[in-house]
Structures are given as structure tokens and as C-alpha cells.
Amino acid sequence: MTKPQQVDTREMRARYPDVFDRPASARLATPVMIVAAFAILTYGLVDLDFSPSRFFAGLSQLGWISLMMIPPDPGSSLPIYLKALGETLSIALLGTTLAAVFALPVSLLAARNIVPSNILRFPIRRFLDSIRGVDTLIWALVWINVVGLGPFAGVLAIAVSDFGAFGKLFSEAIEGADQKQVEGIRASGGSALHEIRFGLLPQVLPVIAGQVLYFIESNTRSATIIGIVGAGGIGLQLAEQIRVLEWQKVSFLILMILVAVAAIDFISGKLRFAIIGRRAVA
Amino acid sequence: MTIAVSILPEQQLAALNAAYRQAVSRRRLRLLLGAAIFAAALVLAAIGAEVNLRTLFTYFGNFISYFDRILTLDSGQRVWTDVGEWLWGWRKWLKMLGETLLISYVGTLIGATFAFCLNFFAAENTSPSPWLRFVVRRLLEFARTVPGIVFALVFVIAFGLGPMAGVLAIAIHSTGALGKLFSEIVENADMKPVEGIRSTGASWLSCMRFAIVPQVTAGYASYALLRFEINVREASVMGFVGAGGIGQELVVAIRKFYYSDVSAILLTIIVTVFIIDITTGWLRGRLFGKDART
């Protein structure tokens, strides 16, 4: 057994100045950031009037509400709720499909390898970005003004807001496609449309199908909430029952939503793997 | 130079062709079947959602003219001809936008803090006991599946109208979403440092602090920034149910048909979301390299 060699700190310090004497800016960066983050937090808490008394009063109120939610009980309105749930699923399915159908041609125009001209592509991209910048709920409000209250407004709201998202995702999928197959088609004398149909689409369709399924899944969630502003589906029932303080019905509705979302997750997960294999879809 | 293409003898070719046709026809059949099922589901959904194409075609003009109307001032001119008149309420709107940003900031920070505390219990490799992991995971799942605005609806009744309900709703939803992402980072962390620290006799807490946390902070910060971006959008609609922020102004403008105000508020929201997206994207790129930008 040999004794571990004594380390001369001074020598080490001279040899590795970066480790022992870090510049003040590097040492201070983290604490300064943390202090700044908490300063903004405190300012926010004060500005948004978070008083402890109000917080705890609300918390005890919330405790009461949760107690009153047990046991979940639909009363006599179970058929109505089931119908509303069906409506929600319909809204998600139809809205997503509509969006995908309209987004596909537009996404071709927004893809760099199809439309090389920046001048043409830029406005389309910005257009898609601004559609995405507006939340689904806002679109729902706008459509309610146009086609009136009801699930149809919800379908259109989801269709419009997904149109923006799909346009971007699809065009990214198209840009990521392998160019060699397109070149092959061109070399054999195919027209531009042939290139897209036989060179590009076979590559991107599975990716797109995966994304559409994923969006149907996440739109089930969006479709539950657009009802809150009056665009049909189970959200409408939920908002109404919350407003009239029927807590047992509220908890039943929330449970229904959770179960439905889990079921859709499961089904679309299976379908997605069947279509594109075990690959992650972002 | 000529290239000879060798053609297989007739029987072999026939067999291969038959196999090829069978494979193709089977695929076609499956595709057709899938398309039929999908079409049937669509028709069913269309009936369920009370789709009425006649309404759509009658009113589609309204949709276009709606945008025409929101881009017109009361005086009948286009909004951009008189920006001062169009953005007349910019002081109030900027204040509300500031409130929206604060709501999402405070909500994200509280949510991230809770997610940070909970995620070690939810991760496969660091959770001290299986039943604790099960409980925490279900809790996070619940927090992320119930939409934020539903929490906001309930909180508005419990805590009263105002931004507090919005902050708490966003905080809970972020806890659920970030908790899951954080625990996935922890599951991908290298376990050798943990072994090293545990072999010195350290407690579970010290193992987490000195072995796991240094590996995962960059990933946490990146996800938290991404969440902040999402929460800004979310906070902009919290006002619809009375939970504070610019949404309140927007919903009043839409419902009361103050057309030019609608476009002005939408513009401010879109610009803010753009700015936040670009800033956080840049920040994540600066902090964590180019890969974190997506």
C-alpha cells in the first residue's frame, strides 16, 4: 500500500487557473440569474394581488368544492353527456381532417425544395405563423360570430387553427424528404407534378399520417375546451355545470373527459405505430 | 455501348409476377378498407357535429367580411390609414399584455418548481418506492390531462375573479406537463455518478443533489423556457373565463362587435407571441447549443 501522493494546491492552482480562479462574471452569473428570477416572481405576486389571506381562503373553498365533488354523479343527464362527448370526438375528427386536407397543398408551397423562391415562400410562412399565433379559443369566438353557436363553429375553429400548425409541420416533413427519389423521377422524364406524386408523397405521407393522428389525439383535448365559449361538445356542459355549482356533475364530466382522452390516446398510439413503425412523432 | 437486360424464363417470371400482383392487391385492399372506415367515421362525425354545408356556404361570405369589418375603423377607413385611432387603447392593452406575461411567468415558475420537486419521485430510476412513483405519476397525469382553462373555471369560483385563478391554473397544468418531461430527462441521466455518491454513504437527497441535478439542469431550463412560450398563448385566453390578462379585453371586443378593437388586440397578441417565441428560441440556442432550438 502506498500512501496517496500529497497534492500541492499551489501548483495545481497555477496549472489550472480556469478551475480555481474562475472569472467573477462566470461565478456570479448563476446567482444573479436566480436573484433576478425571484425578483420578477415577487413583483408578479404583488402585482397580481396574491395575498396570503386570499390564497388560503380560496384554498379552503377549493377543499369544500372537492369534497362536494365526491361521489361523481351524472344525475339524470347521462344520455345528454354521452351525446356531448360524441359531439366532442366528432369535432376533433372533422376539424383535424379538414385542416389536413387544406394544409397539404399549401404546405407544398411553403417547402423550400418545391418552391425555391424566397419571395413566394416568405409570405406563406408568415401567414401560417400568424394563424398559429391565434389560439383555438379565439378562432372559436370568431366562428361563433359567423355560423352561430354550436358544434359546427367548433369544427371550423379547430380546422383553422390546425391549418396553421399542419402547414408548418407538413412543409418541414417535405423539406426533410430525400431528394434522390425526386431526381430519379425527373431523370426519367417526369413532370413537376409527377415528381411530387411519385418522388415525394410516398416518403412524406406516413409522416403526415402520424402527425394527423397525433393532432386528432390532442384536438380531443382542445375540443373539450372550445365548448366553454359556446362552440358545442362536452365543454359546454362542463362550463354550464360549473357555473351552476353542480359539483358532482362536474367531477363526472371531468372523469368522462379523462377516460375519453386516455382511450383516444391508446387507439391512436396503436394506429400510429401500425402506420409508421415505432418511431417518435414530434 | 449496349446493356443487355436479361429476362427471366417464362415460368419464373409468371410466378414472380403473380406474387407481386397478390402483394399489391392485398395492400390496395387494406388501403381501401382503411379509407372506407375513415370515410364512415367522417360521415358519422359530420352528423354528430351538426355540420351543415348550406350554413357554411351561406355564411362563408360572413367569415371573409368579418375580417373586412375588423380591419375597418368606425369612420369607414382601413385601420392602417389611421394607426393612432386604431390602437387608441394601447396604454390599457399594453398593461393587460404585461399582466398576461406576468401570469405566464409566475405560473411557469411555480409549475416548474413543483415539477422539479416531484419529478425525482416519478422517474423510473430514482424513485424511492414503486407505490410513491405510481401516485406521483397519476397525479401529474391528472394535472396535465385536465385542460388549463377548466382549472381556471373552477379556480375563478374558489379564488374569485382575477389573475390569481389564471396563475394557479397555469401553474398546475405546467406542473403536470413539465413533471413528465423532467422525469424523462432524469430517466435518461447517467446512473454512474449516483452509484459513486451512494458508495460514499450519502443519503437519497444528496444523491439527487450531487449526482442527478448537475446532469439535468440544462434540459430542465430548456423545457421550462419552451413551456413559458406555450403558457403565454394559454394566458392570453385565460381572460375568457375571467382569470385575468388580455383575453378579457378581447372577449368583450368580440362579443360587443367593437370590430377595429378586435383586430388591434389580436395584432398585439400575435406580435407579443412572435417576440416571445423568437426571444426564447434565441435564448435556448445561446444557453444550450443549436440542438435545443426545436
Image (tube, rainbow, N blue to C red):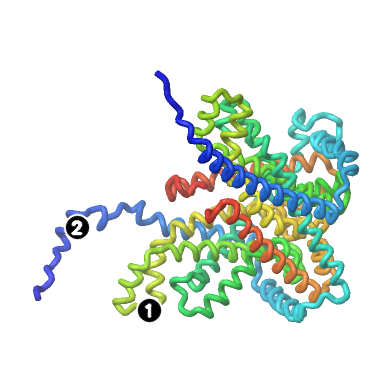
**For numbered disc 2, what is the local secondary structure?**
helix
Left or right of residue B45, residue A48 in this image: left
Q: Position of residue A252 (x, y in %)?
A: 77, 73
Which of the chains bears the disc numbered 1? B
In the image, what residue type sits under mark 2? Arg
Q: Quadrant of the N terminus of chain B?
A: top left
Question: Which residue does the image show at 83% across and 54% down from the upper left?
Answer: B49
Evaluate whether residue B251 shows in this view: no
Question: Which residue does the image show at 66% across and 49% down from the upper left?
Answer: A212
In the image, what residue type sits under mark 1? Ser
Q: Position of residue B87 (x, y in %)?
A: 74, 38
Left or right of residue A252, residue A262 in this image: left
Check disc 1 and report the residue beneath it.
B203
| Front position in the image: B224 or B191 | B191
**Residue A13 shows which numbered tag?**
2
- Position of residue A99 relative to residue A1, above or below, is above
| Front position in the image: B264 or B122 | B122
- Position of residue A88 relative to residue A158, above or below, is below
| Front position in the image: A234 or B209 | A234
Q: Quadrant of residue B2?
A: top left
Q: Quadrant of residue A241?
A: bottom right
Most distant residue in the top direction: B1
Q: Position of residue B26 (x, y in %)?
A: 64, 49
**For numbered disc 1, what is the local secondary structure?**
loop
Which of the chains bears the disc numbered 2? A
Task: Name the mark nearer the viewer: 1 or 2.
Answer: 1
